[in-house]
Image (tube, rainbow, N blue to C red):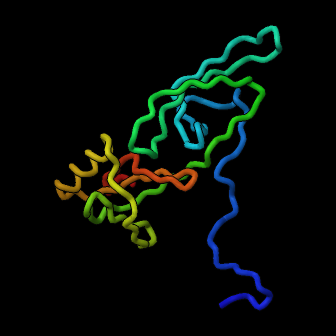
Amino acid sequence: MADPDGFDFQTGESGASATFPMQCSALRKNGYVLLKGHPCKIVEMSTSKTGKHGHAKVTTTQNSPQFQNGCLGKYEDMCPSTHNMDVPSIKRTEYQLLNIADDYMTLMSDNGDIREDLRVPENEVGKEIMGKFQASEEFYVSVMSAMGEECAIGTKTMGNK
């Protein structure tokens, strides 16, 4: 039922931003940054000494977005250590795998909600999921989400949640 004052409070958004700024010097290996609008994992980092212009430079090497099946390779970015870079808000969720049909997984959350909108990834994790499913194992699928994109990143056996 609509609010009589004309306000619609039906959305479930928390209002949290998809990204937040972080100083380059605070970034760490295995963390995430934004690359061309996609969340990417930092695989290497190095910091140069302060130069004649007064700033140390942080060089990061990022893997291509984990959320896309196509691989973009590795990219390098350099930023003054005192400047900010956008960091995506990352969320991990565990789902029980119920079924796979037409390369889409049927997943159940802890509260019993069912979702069927996540495709089996075309990588080693996807091969692991398919192998365990074909062997009739019961397991959880770890799903990472950031900026409206989601992907399966691993599996856990039922007893080790």
The location of residue 88, given as percent across then percent down, is 61, 45
Residue 97 shown left or right of residue 144 in the figure: left
Residue farthest left in this picture: 135
Q: Quadrant of residue 5?
A: bottom right
The image shows residue 157 at horizontal and vertical percentages of 31, 52
Rendered location of residue 142, percent (x, y): 41, 52
Query: Between residues 107 and 51, which one lies in front from this camera angle?
Result: 51
Q: Does residue 46 sit above or below 14 in this rendering?
A: above
- The residue depicted at 39 percent of the width and 64 percent of the height is 117
What residue sits 61% from the left and 49% below the top?
A: 89
Quarter of the figure that contains the C terminus: bottom left
Q: Residue at x 48, y 32 (%)?
A: 63
Q: Nearer the viewer, residue 86 or 128?
A: 86
Q: Quadrant of residue 76?
A: top right
Tell me which residue sits at (30%, 56%) in the image: 139
Kindly tell me whether residue 159 is visible in this rendering.
no
Residue nearer the viewer, 96 or 150 = 150
Q: Residue furthest top?
A: 52
- Taking the image as shown, residue 4 lies to the left or right of residue 90, namely right
| Picture layout, residue 100 above or below residue 64 | below
